[in-house]
Image (spheres, rainbow, N blue to C red):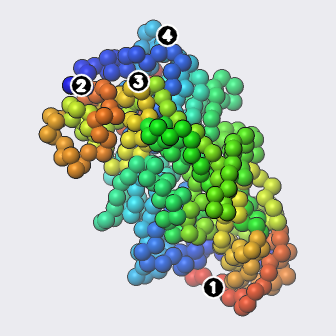
Amino acid sequence: MTEKLTNAQIAWRAAQDIADGAYVNLGIGFPEMVAKFQPPGRQAIFHTENGVLNFGESPPEGEEDWDLINAGKKAITLKPGAAFFHHADSFAMVRGGHLDVAILGAYEVAANGDLANWSTGPKGVPAVGGAMDLVHGAKRVAVITDHVTKDGRPKLVKRCGLPLTGVGCVTRVYTSLAVVDIESRRFVLREKLPKLSLDVLQAVTGAELLVDGAVGDLIVPEV
Amino acid sequence: MDKIVPHLATAVAGIEDGMTLMVGGFGGSGAPIELLHALVDRFRATGSPKGLIVINNNAGNGRIGIAAMIDAGMVAKMVCSFPRSADPRAFTEKYLAGQIGLELVPQGTLAERIRAGGAGIPAFYTPTSFGTDLAEGKPVAEFDGRMYVQERWLKADAALIKAELADTMGNLTYRKAARNFSPLMAAAARVTIVQASKIVAPDGIDPEQVVTPGIFVNRIVQITDAQQEEALMRAGVAYA
Protein backbone atom coordinates (compact mmCIF):
# COMPACT_ATOMS: atom_id res chain seq x y z
CA MET A 1 0.00 0.00 0.00
CA THR A 2 1.49 3.29 -0.98
CA GLU A 3 -0.59 5.92 0.70
CA LYS A 4 -2.51 6.18 3.93
CA LEU A 5 -3.68 8.81 6.39
CA THR A 6 -1.57 9.66 9.42
CA ASN A 7 -3.11 9.28 12.88
CA ALA A 8 -3.60 13.05 12.99
CA GLN A 9 -5.45 12.91 9.68
CA ILE A 10 -7.71 10.11 10.90
CA ALA A 11 -8.45 12.19 14.00
CA TRP A 12 -9.16 15.21 11.77
CA ARG A 13 -11.68 13.24 9.73
CA ALA A 14 -13.47 11.97 12.85
CA ALA A 15 -13.63 15.52 14.21
CA GLN A 16 -15.57 16.70 11.14
CA ASP A 17 -18.57 14.59 12.22
CA ILE A 18 -18.82 16.12 15.71
CA ALA A 19 -21.58 18.72 15.88
CA ASP A 20 -21.41 22.04 17.69
CA GLY A 21 -22.48 21.51 21.30
CA ALA A 22 -22.07 17.72 21.19
CA TYR A 23 -21.10 15.94 24.41
CA VAL A 24 -18.09 13.79 23.58
CA ASN A 25 -15.82 11.29 25.31
CA LEU A 26 -12.45 10.61 23.71
CA GLY A 27 -10.58 7.46 24.72
CA ILE A 28 -7.10 7.62 26.20
CA GLY A 29 -4.21 8.05 23.74
CA PHE A 30 -4.76 8.40 20.01
CA PRO A 31 -8.48 9.40 20.28
CA GLU A 32 -7.50 12.40 22.42
CA MET A 33 -6.10 13.97 19.21
CA VAL A 34 -9.63 14.46 17.86
CA ALA A 35 -10.10 17.45 20.19
CA LYS A 36 -7.42 19.39 18.29
CA PHE A 37 -9.29 19.28 15.00
CA GLN A 38 -12.71 20.71 15.79
CA PRO A 39 -13.90 22.67 12.75
CA PRO A 40 -13.99 26.46 13.18
CA GLY A 41 -17.21 27.67 14.75
CA ARG A 42 -17.96 24.40 16.51
CA GLN A 43 -17.31 23.66 20.14
CA ALA A 44 -17.90 20.21 21.57
CA ILE A 45 -18.09 19.62 25.31
CA PHE A 46 -15.61 16.97 26.36
CA HIS A 47 -16.35 14.50 29.14
CA THR A 48 -13.76 12.57 31.09
CA GLU A 49 -14.63 9.52 33.20
CA ASN A 50 -13.02 10.84 36.37
CA GLY A 51 -15.62 13.56 36.72
CA VAL A 52 -15.09 16.63 34.52
CA LEU A 53 -17.22 18.13 31.75
CA ASN A 54 -15.90 20.84 29.42
CA PHE A 55 -12.20 20.51 29.95
CA GLY A 56 -9.62 22.03 27.64
CA GLU A 57 -6.02 21.55 26.65
CA SER A 58 -3.11 20.61 28.86
CA PRO A 59 -1.57 23.51 30.79
CA PRO A 60 2.01 24.59 30.04
CA GLU A 61 4.67 22.46 31.74
CA GLY A 62 5.20 23.60 35.30
CA GLU A 63 1.62 24.89 35.65
CA GLU A 64 -0.04 21.50 36.15
CA ASP A 65 -2.52 21.03 38.97
CA TRP A 66 -2.46 17.27 39.60
CA ASP A 67 -5.93 17.32 41.15
CA LEU A 68 -7.16 18.39 37.70
CA ILE A 69 -6.51 15.49 35.33
CA ASN A 70 -8.27 13.45 32.67
CA ALA A 71 -8.85 9.70 32.50
CA GLY A 72 -5.37 9.28 31.04
CA LYS A 73 -3.98 10.97 34.21
CA LYS A 74 -2.78 13.92 32.11
CA ALA A 75 -3.10 17.45 33.51
CA ILE A 76 -5.94 19.41 31.91
CA THR A 77 -7.47 22.89 32.12
CA LEU A 78 -11.10 23.96 32.44
CA LYS A 79 -13.17 25.93 29.96
CA PRO A 80 -15.85 28.39 31.10
CA GLY A 81 -18.92 26.37 32.05
CA ALA A 82 -17.02 23.30 33.26
CA ALA A 83 -18.45 21.00 35.92
CA PHE A 84 -17.12 18.49 38.44
CA PHE A 85 -19.10 15.43 39.54
CA HIS A 86 -18.50 12.09 41.21
CA HIS A 87 -17.85 8.80 39.45
CA ALA A 88 -21.40 7.43 39.65
CA ASP A 89 -22.76 10.58 37.99
CA SER A 90 -19.97 10.38 35.43
CA PHE A 91 -20.94 6.87 34.38
CA ALA A 92 -24.64 7.75 34.50
CA MET A 93 -23.73 10.19 31.72
CA VAL A 94 -21.99 7.32 29.90
CA ARG A 95 -24.47 4.44 30.25
CA GLY A 96 -27.56 6.63 30.47
CA GLY A 97 -27.33 7.68 26.81
CA HIS A 98 -26.38 11.29 27.53
CA LEU A 99 -23.16 11.42 25.50
CA ASP A 100 -23.56 12.10 21.81
CA VAL A 101 -20.32 10.48 20.72
CA ALA A 102 -17.64 8.22 22.16
CA ILE A 103 -14.48 7.74 20.09
CA LEU A 104 -12.20 4.84 20.94
CA GLY A 105 -9.17 3.03 19.60
CA ALA A 106 -9.32 -0.63 18.56
CA TYR A 107 -7.31 -3.80 18.22
CA GLU A 108 -10.12 -5.31 16.15
CA VAL A 109 -13.60 -4.25 15.00
CA ALA A 110 -15.98 -6.86 13.61
CA ALA A 111 -18.66 -6.48 10.95
CA ASN A 112 -21.28 -7.23 13.61
CA GLY A 113 -20.15 -4.17 15.60
CA ASP A 114 -18.16 -6.09 18.21
CA LEU A 115 -15.10 -4.26 19.51
CA ALA A 116 -11.87 -5.62 21.02
CA ASN A 117 -9.68 -2.89 22.46
CA TRP A 118 -8.77 -3.76 26.07
CA SER A 119 -6.77 -6.98 26.14
CA THR A 120 -4.35 -8.74 23.83
CA GLY A 121 -4.67 -11.99 25.74
CA PRO A 122 -3.95 -13.64 29.07
CA LYS A 123 -0.34 -12.46 29.51
CA GLY A 124 0.62 -9.70 31.94
CA VAL A 125 -1.62 -7.59 34.14
CA PRO A 126 -5.17 -7.12 32.79
CA ALA A 127 -6.63 -3.59 32.91
CA VAL A 128 -9.96 -2.41 31.52
CA GLY A 129 -10.64 1.10 32.88
CA GLY A 130 -13.81 2.65 31.48
CA ALA A 131 -13.72 1.09 27.99
CA MET A 132 -16.46 -1.50 28.62
CA ASP A 133 -18.77 1.21 29.97
CA LEU A 134 -18.03 3.72 27.22
CA VAL A 135 -19.10 1.39 24.42
CA HIS A 136 -22.61 1.31 25.88
CA GLY A 137 -24.79 4.36 26.06
CA ALA A 138 -23.22 6.96 23.80
CA LYS A 139 -25.55 7.69 20.86
CA ARG A 140 -22.67 7.04 18.44
CA VAL A 141 -19.69 4.81 19.24
CA ALA A 142 -16.96 5.44 16.70
CA VAL A 143 -13.56 3.83 16.34
CA ILE A 144 -10.43 5.44 14.92
CA THR A 145 -7.69 3.09 13.85
CA ASP A 146 -5.11 2.19 11.27
CA HIS A 147 -6.80 -0.01 8.67
CA VAL A 148 -4.33 -2.85 9.31
CA THR A 149 -2.02 -3.96 12.13
CA LYS A 150 1.70 -3.12 12.13
CA ASP A 151 2.37 -6.45 10.43
CA GLY A 152 -0.31 -5.86 7.81
CA ARG A 153 -3.22 -7.96 9.10
CA PRO A 154 -6.76 -6.54 8.81
CA LYS A 155 -8.17 -4.81 11.90
CA LEU A 156 -11.65 -4.83 10.38
CA VAL A 157 -12.62 -8.48 10.67
CA LYS A 158 -15.57 -10.89 10.42
CA ARG A 159 -15.41 -11.81 14.09
CA CYS A 160 -13.03 -10.54 16.78
CA GLY A 161 -10.41 -13.05 17.91
CA LEU A 162 -9.24 -11.00 20.91
CA PRO A 163 -11.24 -10.59 24.14
CA LEU A 164 -14.27 -8.38 23.54
CA THR A 165 -14.81 -4.94 25.02
CA GLY A 166 -18.44 -4.87 23.89
CA VAL A 167 -20.92 -6.70 21.69
CA GLY A 168 -22.52 -5.00 18.67
CA CYS A 169 -21.57 -1.55 19.91
CA VAL A 170 -19.60 0.22 17.14
CA THR A 171 -21.49 2.34 14.61
CA ARG A 172 -18.68 3.89 12.52
CA VAL A 173 -14.99 3.24 11.88
CA TYR A 174 -12.53 5.88 10.67
CA THR A 175 -9.41 4.22 9.34
CA SER A 176 -6.21 5.24 7.57
CA LEU A 177 -7.86 4.25 4.28
CA ALA A 178 -11.62 4.58 4.61
CA VAL A 179 -14.75 5.52 6.54
CA VAL A 180 -16.93 2.49 7.18
CA ASP A 181 -20.35 2.31 8.84
CA ILE A 182 -21.66 -0.74 10.61
CA GLU A 183 -25.28 -1.34 9.68
CA SER A 184 -27.30 -4.52 10.14
CA ARG A 185 -24.11 -6.39 11.21
CA ARG A 186 -22.26 -5.50 7.99
CA PHE A 187 -19.47 -3.11 6.97
CA VAL A 188 -20.82 -0.46 4.61
CA LEU A 189 -18.17 1.63 2.81
CA ARG A 190 -18.89 5.37 2.95
CA GLU A 191 -15.58 6.96 1.92
CA LYS A 192 -12.19 5.79 0.70
CA LEU A 193 -8.92 7.42 -0.34
CA PRO A 194 -9.54 8.64 -3.91
CA LYS A 195 -6.63 6.74 -5.53
CA LEU A 196 -7.37 3.50 -3.72
CA SER A 197 -9.31 0.91 -5.71
CA LEU A 198 -12.16 -0.95 -4.09
CA ASP A 199 -10.37 -4.26 -4.79
CA VAL A 200 -7.20 -3.19 -2.99
CA LEU A 201 -9.21 -1.88 -0.05
CA GLN A 202 -11.21 -5.10 0.13
CA ALA A 203 -8.00 -7.13 0.10
CA VAL A 204 -6.82 -5.51 3.34
CA THR A 205 -10.23 -5.77 5.00
CA GLY A 206 -11.12 -8.97 6.84
CA ALA A 207 -14.82 -8.96 5.99
CA GLU A 208 -16.95 -7.97 3.05
CA LEU A 209 -17.24 -4.21 2.41
CA LEU A 210 -20.70 -3.46 1.09
CA VAL A 211 -21.28 -0.54 -1.22
CA ASP A 212 -24.68 0.97 -0.60
CA GLY A 213 -24.97 4.25 -2.47
CA ALA A 214 -22.18 6.58 -3.44
CA VAL A 215 -18.70 6.10 -1.98
CA GLY A 216 -17.24 9.51 -1.16
CA ASP A 217 -13.62 10.56 -1.58
CA LEU A 218 -11.77 10.59 1.74
CA ILE A 219 -9.86 13.83 1.34
CA VAL A 220 -7.99 15.13 4.38
CA PRO A 221 -5.65 18.13 4.53
CA GLU A 222 -2.07 17.88 5.76
CA VAL A 223 -2.40 18.39 9.51
CA MET B 1 -20.91 15.58 68.13
CA ASP B 2 -17.47 16.58 67.05
CA LYS B 3 -15.95 14.11 64.56
CA ILE B 4 -12.47 15.59 64.68
CA VAL B 5 -9.61 13.34 65.78
CA PRO B 6 -6.24 14.85 66.68
CA HIS B 7 -3.76 12.46 65.02
CA LEU B 8 -3.43 10.25 61.97
CA ALA B 9 -2.81 7.22 64.20
CA THR B 10 -6.14 7.81 65.96
CA ALA B 11 -7.86 8.32 62.64
CA VAL B 12 -6.85 4.90 61.30
CA ALA B 13 -7.27 3.04 64.61
CA GLY B 14 -9.47 -0.05 64.37
CA ILE B 15 -8.38 -1.03 60.86
CA GLU B 16 -7.41 -4.65 61.43
CA ASP B 17 -6.08 -7.65 59.52
CA GLY B 18 -8.27 -8.95 56.72
CA MET B 19 -10.52 -5.91 56.49
CA THR B 20 -11.86 -4.47 53.25
CA LEU B 21 -10.82 -0.85 52.65
CA MET B 22 -12.11 1.61 50.10
CA VAL B 23 -9.51 4.22 49.18
CA GLY B 24 -10.61 7.38 47.39
CA GLY B 25 -8.75 8.84 44.45
CA PHE B 26 -8.23 8.36 40.74
CA GLY B 27 -4.52 8.06 40.11
CA GLY B 28 -3.02 10.74 42.32
CA SER B 29 -6.07 13.00 42.28
CA GLY B 30 -7.79 12.56 45.65
CA ALA B 31 -5.42 9.90 47.00
CA PRO B 32 -5.35 10.18 50.85
CA ILE B 33 -1.59 9.74 51.07
CA GLU B 34 -1.20 10.67 54.76
CA LEU B 35 -3.91 8.23 55.91
CA LEU B 36 -2.35 5.44 53.83
CA HIS B 37 1.11 6.16 55.18
CA ALA B 38 -0.28 6.12 58.74
CA LEU B 39 -1.40 2.54 58.04
CA VAL B 40 2.04 1.68 56.68
CA ASP B 41 3.61 3.16 59.84
CA ARG B 42 1.40 1.01 62.07
CA PHE B 43 2.16 -2.10 60.01
CA ARG B 44 5.90 -1.47 60.32
CA ALA B 45 5.60 -0.97 64.06
CA THR B 46 3.15 -3.79 64.86
CA GLY B 47 2.87 -6.13 61.83
CA SER B 48 -0.78 -5.11 61.39
CA PRO B 49 -2.96 -4.43 59.46
CA LYS B 50 -2.22 -7.01 56.79
CA GLY B 51 -4.24 -9.27 54.50
CA LEU B 52 -6.26 -6.23 53.41
CA ILE B 53 -8.64 -6.12 50.47
CA VAL B 54 -8.25 -2.68 48.91
CA ILE B 55 -10.84 -1.12 46.58
CA ASN B 56 -9.54 1.74 44.43
CA ASN B 57 -9.67 2.61 40.74
CA ASN B 58 -5.97 1.78 40.38
CA ALA B 59 -3.41 -0.35 42.17
CA GLY B 60 -0.81 2.15 43.25
CA ASN B 61 1.92 4.09 41.53
CA GLY B 62 5.63 4.20 42.38
CA ARG B 63 6.60 3.55 46.01
CA ILE B 64 4.01 5.64 47.86
CA GLY B 65 0.38 5.36 48.98
CA ILE B 66 -1.29 2.09 47.96
CA ALA B 67 1.93 1.01 46.24
CA ALA B 68 3.80 1.41 49.54
CA MET B 69 1.15 -0.76 51.24
CA ILE B 70 1.54 -3.41 48.53
CA ASP B 71 5.35 -3.23 48.78
CA ALA B 72 5.13 -3.67 52.55
CA GLY B 73 3.04 -6.83 52.08
CA MET B 74 -0.16 -5.47 53.65
CA VAL B 75 -2.50 -6.11 50.72
CA ALA B 76 -3.98 -9.54 49.88
CA LYS B 77 -6.15 -8.39 46.98
CA MET B 78 -6.96 -5.34 44.87
CA VAL B 79 -10.43 -4.62 43.50
CA CYS B 80 -9.88 -2.09 40.71
CA SER B 81 -10.48 -1.16 37.08
CA PHE B 82 -6.97 -0.24 35.97
CA PRO B 83 -4.00 -1.76 37.82
CA ARG B 84 -1.51 0.05 35.62
CA SER B 85 0.22 3.38 36.14
CA ALA B 86 3.34 5.30 35.21
CA ASP B 87 5.27 3.08 37.64
CA PRO B 88 3.21 -0.06 38.41
CA ARG B 89 6.11 -2.17 39.76
CA ALA B 90 4.68 -2.76 43.24
CA PHE B 91 1.46 -4.40 42.06
CA THR B 92 2.87 -5.97 38.88
CA GLU B 93 5.71 -7.82 40.64
CA LYS B 94 3.45 -9.29 43.30
CA TYR B 95 0.68 -10.11 40.82
CA LEU B 96 2.98 -11.95 38.42
CA ALA B 97 4.48 -13.83 41.40
CA GLY B 98 0.99 -14.87 42.50
CA GLN B 99 1.35 -12.98 45.79
CA ILE B 100 -1.62 -10.63 45.37
CA GLY B 101 -5.16 -11.16 44.10
CA LEU B 102 -7.01 -9.05 41.56
CA GLU B 103 -10.69 -8.55 40.90
CA LEU B 104 -10.84 -6.50 37.70
CA VAL B 105 -14.03 -4.42 37.45
CA PRO B 106 -15.05 -2.04 34.64
CA GLN B 107 -14.74 1.49 35.96
CA GLY B 108 -18.41 2.46 35.75
CA THR B 109 -19.44 -0.86 37.26
CA LEU B 110 -16.97 -0.31 40.09
CA ALA B 111 -18.49 3.13 40.79
CA GLU B 112 -22.05 1.82 40.64
CA ARG B 113 -21.29 -1.21 42.84
CA ILE B 114 -19.92 1.17 45.48
CA ARG B 115 -22.89 3.51 45.05
CA ALA B 116 -25.24 0.53 45.43
CA GLY B 117 -23.42 -0.56 48.58
CA GLY B 118 -23.98 2.84 50.12
CA ALA B 119 -27.58 2.99 48.95
CA GLY B 120 -28.70 -0.40 50.24
CA ILE B 121 -29.19 -1.91 46.76
CA PRO B 122 -27.75 -5.46 46.78
CA ALA B 123 -27.59 -5.91 43.00
CA PHE B 124 -28.39 -4.13 39.75
CA TYR B 125 -28.21 -4.74 35.99
CA THR B 126 -25.83 -2.93 33.65
CA PRO B 127 -25.13 -3.27 29.91
CA THR B 128 -21.40 -3.00 30.67
CA SER B 129 -19.36 -6.16 30.07
CA PHE B 130 -22.22 -8.16 28.54
CA GLY B 131 -20.71 -10.77 26.21
CA THR B 132 -17.17 -10.26 27.54
CA ASP B 133 -14.82 -12.26 29.75
CA LEU B 134 -15.59 -9.97 32.70
CA ALA B 135 -19.24 -11.10 32.71
CA GLU B 136 -18.31 -14.78 33.04
CA GLY B 137 -20.42 -16.57 35.64
CA LYS B 138 -22.69 -13.59 36.27
CA PRO B 139 -26.46 -13.75 35.79
CA VAL B 140 -27.76 -11.96 32.69
CA ALA B 141 -31.26 -10.81 31.78
CA GLU B 142 -33.08 -9.10 28.93
CA PHE B 143 -34.88 -5.81 29.52
CA ASP B 144 -36.74 -4.09 26.65
CA GLY B 145 -34.89 -6.18 24.09
CA ARG B 146 -31.36 -5.57 25.36
CA MET B 147 -29.08 -7.81 27.44
CA TYR B 148 -27.71 -6.79 30.83
CA VAL B 149 -25.36 -8.25 33.42
CA GLN B 150 -26.18 -8.51 37.10
CA GLU B 151 -23.64 -6.90 39.40
CA ARG B 152 -23.56 -6.87 43.20
CA TRP B 153 -22.98 -4.10 45.68
CA LEU B 154 -19.58 -3.40 47.22
CA LYS B 155 -19.24 -2.45 50.85
CA ALA B 156 -16.24 -1.97 53.09
CA ASP B 157 -15.18 -1.99 56.71
CA ALA B 158 -13.60 1.42 56.27
CA ALA B 159 -13.17 4.13 53.65
CA LEU B 160 -10.13 6.41 53.57
CA ILE B 161 -10.77 9.62 51.67
CA LYS B 162 -9.27 13.05 51.10
CA ALA B 163 -11.46 16.14 51.29
CA GLU B 164 -10.72 19.82 50.81
CA LEU B 165 -12.98 21.32 53.50
CA ALA B 166 -14.66 19.47 56.34
CA ASP B 167 -16.81 21.00 59.02
CA THR B 168 -16.87 19.46 62.47
CA MET B 169 -20.21 17.77 61.60
CA GLY B 170 -18.49 15.85 58.79
CA ASN B 171 -19.87 17.74 55.81
CA LEU B 172 -17.29 17.68 53.01
CA THR B 173 -16.21 19.43 49.85
CA TYR B 174 -13.54 18.21 47.46
CA ARG B 175 -10.91 19.89 45.33
CA LYS B 176 -11.45 19.84 41.54
CA ALA B 177 -11.38 16.30 40.06
CA ALA B 178 -10.19 14.85 43.39
CA ARG B 179 -13.84 14.10 44.17
CA ASN B 180 -14.13 11.02 41.87
CA PHE B 181 -15.00 7.90 43.94
CA SER B 182 -14.85 9.49 47.41
CA PRO B 183 -18.52 10.54 47.88
CA LEU B 184 -19.60 7.00 46.88
CA MET B 185 -17.08 5.34 49.19
CA ALA B 186 -18.05 7.56 52.12
CA ALA B 187 -21.55 6.08 51.96
CA ALA B 188 -20.49 2.47 51.34
CA ALA B 189 -18.14 1.96 54.30
CA ARG B 190 -19.01 1.14 57.90
CA VAL B 191 -16.46 3.71 59.10
CA THR B 192 -15.47 6.63 56.89
CA ILE B 193 -12.19 8.30 57.76
CA VAL B 194 -11.37 11.64 56.17
CA GLN B 195 -8.23 13.67 55.87
CA ALA B 196 -9.29 17.24 55.21
CA SER B 197 -7.01 20.04 54.11
CA LYS B 198 -8.96 22.41 56.36
CA ILE B 199 -11.49 21.90 59.14
CA VAL B 200 -14.05 24.64 59.67
CA ALA B 201 -16.88 25.36 62.11
CA PRO B 202 -20.37 23.99 61.28
CA ASP B 203 -21.32 27.24 59.56
CA GLY B 204 -18.08 27.24 57.55
CA ILE B 205 -19.47 25.39 54.53
CA ASP B 206 -22.54 26.75 52.76
CA PRO B 207 -25.13 23.90 52.90
CA GLU B 208 -25.72 24.49 49.17
CA GLN B 209 -22.09 23.53 48.53
CA VAL B 210 -21.85 20.37 50.62
CA VAL B 211 -20.88 17.40 48.41
CA THR B 212 -20.75 14.63 51.04
CA PRO B 213 -23.23 15.14 53.90
CA GLY B 214 -21.84 14.47 57.37
CA ILE B 215 -24.08 11.44 57.95
CA PHE B 216 -21.61 9.45 55.84
CA VAL B 217 -18.52 10.56 57.78
CA ASN B 218 -17.17 9.24 61.09
CA ARG B 219 -13.69 10.66 61.72
CA ILE B 220 -11.84 13.66 60.37
CA VAL B 221 -8.20 14.57 60.76
CA GLN B 222 -6.82 17.87 59.49
CA ILE B 223 -3.81 17.58 57.19
CA THR B 224 -2.81 21.00 55.96
CA ASP B 225 -0.50 21.04 52.95
CA ALA B 226 -1.46 17.44 52.15
CA GLN B 227 0.89 15.60 49.83
CA GLN B 228 -0.22 14.96 46.26
CA GLU B 229 0.59 11.49 44.91
CA GLU B 230 1.46 12.61 41.39
CA ALA B 231 3.72 15.37 42.70
CA LEU B 232 5.51 12.85 44.97
CA MET B 233 5.85 10.46 42.03
CA ARG B 234 7.43 13.10 39.87
CA ALA B 235 9.82 13.96 42.69
CA GLY B 236 10.80 10.28 42.85
CA VAL B 237 9.71 9.91 46.49
CA ALA B 238 9.52 6.43 48.04
CA TYR B 239 7.78 5.91 51.40
CA ALA B 240 10.44 3.72 52.91
Residue density around tag 1, few if under 14, some if 14–19, many if 20 or more, within 10 Å: some
Asked if labels 2 and 4 touch by Cβ distance under 8 angstroms, the answer is no
Mark 4 surroundings: few (<14), some (14-19) or many (≥20) residues within 10 A: some
Q: Residue at x 47, y 15 (%)?
A: B16
Which residue lies under the disc numbered 4? Answer: B47
Tell us which disc is closer to us: 4 or 2: 2
Answer with mark 4 or mark 2, whichever residue precedes in sequence. Answer: 2
Where does the image place residue B74, in percent across and percent down from the top left?
53, 20
Q: Is residue A165 above or below residue B80?
A: below
Mark 3 — on which chain does it sit?
B
The residue wearing badge 1 is A219
**Which residue is depicted at the point 45% across and 8% down?**
B46
- Secondary element under disc 1, as helix, strand or loop, is loop
Question: Can residue A90 be seen at all in this image of the molecule?
Answer: yes
What subunit carries mark 2? Answer: B
* Residue sitting farthest toward the top: B46
| Residue sitting at x 28%, y 43% | B173
- How far apart, in angstroms, are the residues tagged by discs 4 and 2? 27 Å
Q: CA distance from mark 3 to mark 2?
A: 19 Å
Label placed on residue B25: none
